[in-house]
Image (cartoon, grey):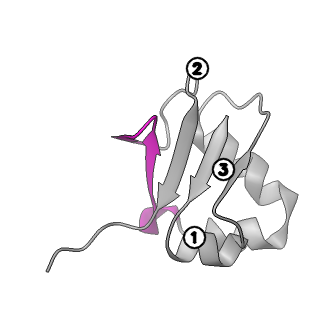
Amino acid sequence: MDVLYFAWVRERIGIPKEKIDTEAATVADLVRELVAREERYAAAFADLSALRVALDQELSGFDAPLTGVREVAFFPPMTGG
């Protein structure tokens, strides 16, 4: 699946996107896999309350299943102005 990172998440990880083979059942499982990879992922996902996730371009939750998902995007909450 494609995993996309936006804003400061991308800055901390150092790449805008990557293709990942995973056995993760949920978004939370995927995050645990990523955090276990390297410190830069741990830094990006240190506070999940400061992050939002979209599955196939639809806002979702960290408990959402990944079955059939082609794209996961992580980003900070948007602010209006």
Spot occupied by residue 49 in the image (x, y as percentages of width and height)? 44, 64
* C-alpha separation, residue under disc 3 versus residue under disc 1: 13 Å
Which of 42/53 is in front? 53
- The kind of residue tagged 3 is Val
In the drawing, does residue 64 fall left or right of residue 4?
left
Residue 31 is marked as 3
Distance in Å between CA atoms under marks 2 and 1:
24 Å
List x then y, in percent, for residue 40.
Answer: 76, 72
Mark number for residue 9? 1
Q: Earlier in the sequence, mark 2 or mark 1?
A: 1
- Rendered-image quadrant of the C terminus: bottom left
Furthest-top residue in view? 68
The mark lying in front, picked from 3 and 1, is 1
Task: State the mark number for residue 67.
Answer: 2
Give the residues in magenta: 48-61
Asked whether, in this view, residue 25 is left or right of residue 74, the answer is: right
**Residue drawn where x is 72% and y is 73% of the image:** 14
* Quarter location, residue 61: top left
Nearer to me, 44 or 28: 44
- Neighbor class of circle 2 (other Cα within 10 Å; few <14, some 14-19, many 20+) is few
Whether the magenta-drawn stretch holds residue 49 is answered as yes
Amino acid type, mark 1: Val
Q: Position of residue 69 (x, y in %)?
A: 55, 27
Residues 54 and 24: in front is: 54
